[in-house]
Image: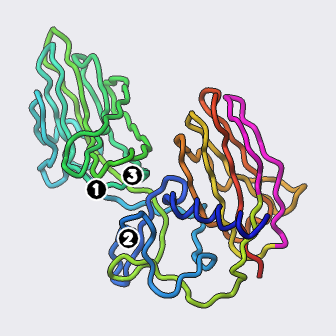
């Protein structure tokens, strides 16, 4: 691999850099507050100090969950808004604690309650969970994740059909914020039968951002070491080009034992379909492989990057898609730095 080709690959990475594997990165300032990592107008990460990319250490297997919304109704109030329903905090039917929310849906009609919005970034993974219970007059229950643009116009709605139950059920989902999204909210929608009003009870509603911990300063700038302990000349390792189908395909293992520095995994989906990648690692070529990161989602045209630590000396990938790709290829690669 020539130096010119390496530079070309690096430019491609930096020009399309996204947060690792679709997970928005948050950092913690010295006072302990969480801050979203700053990027400039071209989407490049803003750092403090002399930048040396190999010294940015982001372990792929270490995820931080940051709670951004919690509603247990234990103060006797609710911050949810309504559409074609009435709501009240009550203590007769609860999942946990003393209070839960009762939502009354008029007979033969559909309505919903919606949480306040919370800020997100495109590609941000969000995990939410809630407890719900319905009476016999509820014939349909649906959860909707509403994505908003910065101007609060709806950009997309992800809907999940749930099964009504007269006993408490816990439902949870992990979703990924779409392109151009800035805020999100959750809607619990229900439909009552024509015979009578229906009742839905909600409790313990939580929303978490899933990210990785990186230390930042008060302005949200990443703190990196300015001391170079590795060579600035990268080595490029290509897995090859692949066309994904519903049958998963595995790459040959890549042995990186000779490269003791950090390793940058680059995944480029040049196909016309959504692809998924699992990352596996082993201590030796013939050893047992264990999952490092699974279910990495790559939209058509996505380039996703992650820094791997040197506890992963042998790497292989497993790739697939829900339908067979008809154009382009999936092109994974590893970039390493020698000590």
Q: Are marks 1 and 2 in contact (CB under 8 Å)?
A: no
Numbered disc in front, either 1 or 2: 2
- Height in image: 195 above or below 112? above
Q: Out of 130 and 10, give the one closest to the viewer.
A: 10
Q: Position of residue 99 (x, y in %)?
A: 19, 46
Q: Residue furthest right?
A: 286
The residue depicted at 54 percent of the width and 64 percent of the height is: 14
Kindly state the secondary structure of the residue where label 1 is placed. Answer: strand
Asked whether the beta carbons under mark 3 and mark 1 sit within 8 Å of each other, the answer is no
With 38 as the anchor, is 330 left or right in this view?
A: right
Q: Are marks 2 and 3 in contact (CB under 8 Å)?
A: no
Residue lying furthest front = 4
Give the class, few, some or many, for how many residues have Cα within 10 Å of label 1's Cα (few <14, many ≥20).
some
For label 3, the residue is 122
Q: Which residue is mark 1?
A: 119
User: Residue at 18% of width from left, 36% of height from top?
Assistant: 113
Looking at the rendering, the stretch of residues picked out in magenta corresponds to 238-258
Looking at the rendered structure, the secondary structure element under dot 2 is: loop
Tell me the residue that label 2 is attached to.
38
Which residue is the extreme one toward the top? Answer: 195
Q: Residue 111 at x, y = what percent?
A: 17, 26
């Amino acid at each position: 691999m020539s130096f010119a080709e390496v530079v070309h690959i690096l430019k491609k990475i930096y020009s399309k850099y996204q947060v690792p594997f679709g997970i928005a990165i948050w950092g913690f300032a010295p006072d302990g507050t969480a801050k979203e990592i700053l990027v400039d107008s071209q989407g490049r990460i803003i750092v403090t100090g002399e930048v040396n990319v190999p010294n940015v250490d982001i372990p792929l297997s270490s995820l931080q969950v940051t709670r951004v919304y919690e509603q247990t109704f234990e103060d006797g109030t609710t911050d949810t808004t309504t559409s074609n329903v009435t709501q009240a905090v009550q203590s007769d039917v609860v999942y946990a604690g003393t209070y839960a929310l009762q939502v009354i849906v008029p007979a033969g009609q559909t309505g919903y309650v919606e949480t306040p919005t919370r800020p997100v970034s495109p590609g941000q993974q969000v995990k939410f969970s809630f407890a719900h219970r319905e009476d016999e007059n509820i014939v349909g229950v649906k959860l909707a994740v509403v994505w908003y643009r910065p101007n609060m116009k709806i950009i997309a709605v992800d809907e999940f059909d749930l099964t009504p139950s007269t006993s408490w059920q816990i439902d949870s989902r992990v979703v990924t914020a779409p392109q151009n999204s800035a805020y999100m909210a959750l809607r619990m929608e229900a439909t009552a039968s024509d015979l009578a009003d229906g009742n839905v009870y909600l409790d313990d509603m939580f929303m978490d951002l899933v990210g990785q911990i990186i230390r930042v300063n008060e302005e949200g700038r990443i703190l990196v070491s300015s001391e170079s302990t590795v060579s600035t000349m990268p080595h490029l390792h290509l897995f090859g080009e692949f066309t994904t189908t519903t049958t998963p395909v595995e790459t040959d293992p890549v042995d990186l034992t000779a490269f003791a520095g950090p390793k940058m995994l680059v995944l480029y989906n040049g196909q016309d379909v959504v692809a998924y990648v699992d990352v596996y690692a082993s201590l030796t070529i013939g050893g047992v492989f264990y999952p490092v990161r699974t279910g990495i989602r790559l939209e058509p045209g996505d380039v996703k990057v992650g820094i791997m630590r040197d506890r992963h000396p042998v790497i292989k990938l497993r790739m697939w898609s829900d339908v067979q790709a008809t154009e382009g290829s999936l092109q994974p690669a590893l970039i390493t730095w020698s000590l």
